[in-house]
């Protein structure tokens, strides 16, 4: 019985390890991240906008209904477009939000070659986000 339990433990451990490896936010061949990246601070935002050609930054708040509705759209855009997607919690990063003129959430900023090039405020549909990204990708 003990040997059987040990074998089950080994199998579960291997399964968890392989799941962790496949769920990690690896960069794809195009150099974009397939999952949104949480940003905490100006230095992290600067790094990601410098390291990636096209970055869609989602300024959001946990208490915001439209932000919660936008989240699955943003995740799909991250997985299926050439843009890297970054998420910034405005409550935790008030100075950063103010620096970029975020007055309401959700606000999406598109960076191309390290510079902000477009701004979308409010709930956006996937087609709109894909269209804006396609202009710069």
Image (tube, rainbow, N blue to C red):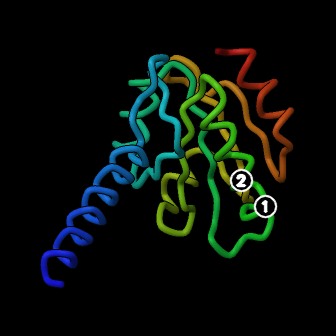
Left or right, 115 with respect to 14, comes to right
Q: Residue at the spot x=45%, y=18% of the render?
A: 29
Q: Quadrant of residue 132?
A: top right
Q: Secondary structure at mark 2?
A: helix
Which residue sits at x=61%, y=36%? 79
Location of residue 5 with respect to 76 vertically, above or below: below
Quarter of the image for the C terminus: give it: top right
Q: Which is nearer the eye, 128 or 47?
A: 128
Residue 26 located left or right of residue 121? left
Please tell me which residue is depicted at 68% across the width and 37% down the height of the picture.
77
Compute the Cα span from label 2 to label 1.
7 Å
Q: Secondary structure at mark 1?
A: helix
Crowd class of label 1 (few under 14; some 14 to 19; many from 20; radius 10 Å): some
- Mark nearer the viewer, 2 or 1: 2
Does 36 appear above or below 84?
below
Depth check, front residue: 52 or 24: 24
Side of 101 relative to 88 (left or right): right
Neighbour tally class for label 2: few under 14, some 14-19, many 20 plus, Cα within 10 Å: few
Q: Is residue 53 above or below residue 41?
A: above
Callouts 2 and 1 close, C-beta under 8 Å: yes
Q: Which residue is mark 1?
A: 69
Residue 1 x, y percent position in the rendering: 18, 84
Vertical relation: 25 (above or below) 127: below
Which residue lies at the image location 42% right of the left edge and 33% below the top edge? 48
Q: Quadrant of residue 27?
A: top left
Q: Residue furthest bottom?
A: 1
Residue identified by numbered label 2: 72
Q: Is residue 122 left or right of residue 78?
A: right
Q: Residue 120: x and y, percent?
A: 78, 40
Which residue occupies the foreground of this view, 27 or 124?
A: 27
């Amino acid at each position: 019985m003990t040997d059987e339990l040990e074998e089950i433990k080994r199998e579960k451990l291997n399964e968890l390890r392989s799941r962790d490896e496949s769920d990690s936010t690896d960069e794809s061949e195009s150099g974009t991240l397939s999952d949104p990246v949480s940003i905490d601070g100006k230095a992290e935002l600067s790094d990601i906008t410098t390291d990636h050609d096209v970055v869609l930054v989602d300024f959001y708040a946990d208490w915001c209904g439209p932000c919660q509705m936008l989240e699955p759209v943003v995740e799909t855009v991250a997985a299926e477009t050439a843009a890297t997607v970054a998420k910034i919690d405005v409550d935790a990063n008030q100075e950063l939000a103010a620096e970029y003129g975020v007055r309401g959430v959700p606000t999406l900023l598109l960076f191309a070659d390290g510079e902000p090039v477009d701004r979308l405020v409010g709930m956006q549909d996937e087609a709109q986000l894909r269209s804006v990204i396609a202009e710069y990708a």
